[in-house]
């Protein structure tokens, strides 16, 4: 099955009140684990790639890995640029075969964000590619005392109308990394409901949405890590966000935690090991299990939203 855009995925997710998982694809084993889970759950999936991963892996290598995944699978797969930093990067990804790109102008003044996003939208739509924009403080900093700049619902309406974006990443209190909250986790659900009411049927996106499961933080620490005060978004909050209009939930930190925990454990239990296949294999299986769990119990997208 060839790569697809996220358009039909989001339409089904909106009508079924579930979310599509957008999982960061950082190497071959992670991609294989994600795709194997999607096949098991009969779920569409978004493989997303950050600019950091493109630079580390090499853009050509990443495309070929995704092409191999698509050639050996029958689930709908969308290839998405995560947090595109500029117009040139978005164009390069569109030209190389991505079916979706995000242009992250969220740090720019409102009018500059509109101008940059519309420029990307015009090029992408001419090439059959969909675009995700961003508005508000999508990155966040749970270690800072500076409050997050949450997305203004009225600005969101104006932004969508002015740019023609196909989806919009909004800030409702999440942030990147394993340290999302300094105290009790809270999300601005009333603000999200307001945006959904003003943009009925329009897909909204949640960045920084890993749950940071305590069992895998503890497993990492048990085998030599030093991860303190890690706290993610509770899974019931993510399900509620999907019910209120979030059609795409980004997940990376949880994948990194579970794979690293398995590798750490393997080396402690097998100090004589040095064959990468021996320690990356368990990591790949752990990724598969994690993604299956997310699809069934967090996103609700298993078997067409019936999981």
Image (cartoon, grey):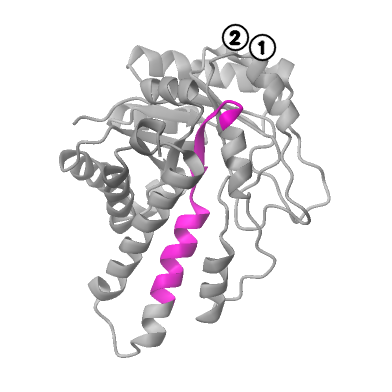
State the residue position of label 1: 158
Residue appearing at x 41%, y 86% in the figure: 268
**Which structural element holds mark 2?**
helix
- Does the segment drawn in magenta span residue 144? no
In the picture provided, is 71 more to the left or to the right than 185? left
54, 13: nearer the viewer: 13
Question: Is 71 above or below relative to 246?
Answer: below
- Does the segment drawn in magenta span residue 250? yes
In the picture provided, is 295 more to the left or to the right than 195? left
Q: How many marks?
A: 2
Where, by quadrant of the figure, is residue 305 drawn? top left
Question: Is 228 above or below relative to 139?
Answer: below
Neighbour class for label 1 at 10 Å: few (<14), some, many (≥20)? few
Q: Which quadrant holds the N terminus?
A: top left
State the residue position of label 2: 161
109, 77: nearer the viewer: 77
Residue appearing at x 43%, y 19% in the figure: 11
Numbered badge on residue 141 = none
Residue appearing at x 61%, y 36% in the figure: 240
Residue that sits furthest to the front in the current view: 306
Task: Give the magenta part as a residue range.
Answer: 243-264
Residue that sits furthest to the bottom in the current view: 272
Residue appearing at x 19%, y 44% in the figure: 68
Give the percent coordinates (x, y) of residue 146.
Answer: 82, 46
Mark 2 → mark 1, Cα distance in angstroms: 5 Å
Give the percent coordinates (x, y) of residue 195.
Answer: 67, 20
């Amino acid at each position: 099955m060839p790569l697809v855009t996220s358009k039909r995925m989001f339409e089904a997710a909106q009508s079924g009140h579930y979310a599509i998982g957008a999982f960061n694809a950082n190497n071959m084993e992670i991609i294989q684990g994600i795709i194997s889970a999607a096949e098991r759950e009969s779920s569409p999936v978004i493989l997303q790639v950050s600019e950091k991963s493109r630079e580390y892996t090499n853009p050509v290598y990443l495309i070929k890995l995704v092409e191999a995944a698509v050639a050996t699978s029958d689930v709908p797969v969308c290839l998405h640029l995560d947090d595109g930093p500029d117009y040139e990067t978005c164009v390069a990804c569109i030209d190389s075969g991505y079916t979706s790109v995000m242009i992250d102008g969220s740090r720019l003044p409102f009018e500059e964000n509109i101008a940059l996003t519309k420029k990307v939208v015009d090029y992408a739509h001419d090439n059959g590619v969909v675009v995700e924009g961003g508005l508000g403080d999508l990155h966040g900093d749970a270690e800072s005392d500076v409050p997050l700049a949450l997305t203004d619902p009225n600005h969101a309406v104006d932004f969508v109308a002015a740019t023609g974006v196909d989806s919009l990443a909004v800030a409702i209190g999440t942030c990147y990394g394993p340290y999302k909250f300094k105290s009790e986790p809270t999300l601005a659900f009333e603000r999200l409901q307001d945006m959904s009411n003003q943009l009925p049927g329009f897909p909204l996106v949640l960045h920084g949405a890993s749950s940071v499961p305590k069992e895998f933080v503890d497993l990492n620490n048990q085998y030599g890590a030093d991860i303190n005060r890690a706290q993610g978004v509770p899974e019931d909050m993510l399900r509620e966000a999907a019910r209120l209009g979030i059609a795409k939930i980004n997940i990376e930190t949880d994948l990194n935690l579970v794979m690293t925990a398995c590798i750490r454990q393997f080396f402690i239990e097998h100090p004589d090991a040095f064959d990468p296949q021996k320690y990356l294999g368990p990591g790949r299986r752990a990724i598969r299990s994690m993604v299956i769990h997310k699809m069934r119990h967090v996103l609700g997208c298993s078997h067409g939203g019936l999981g």
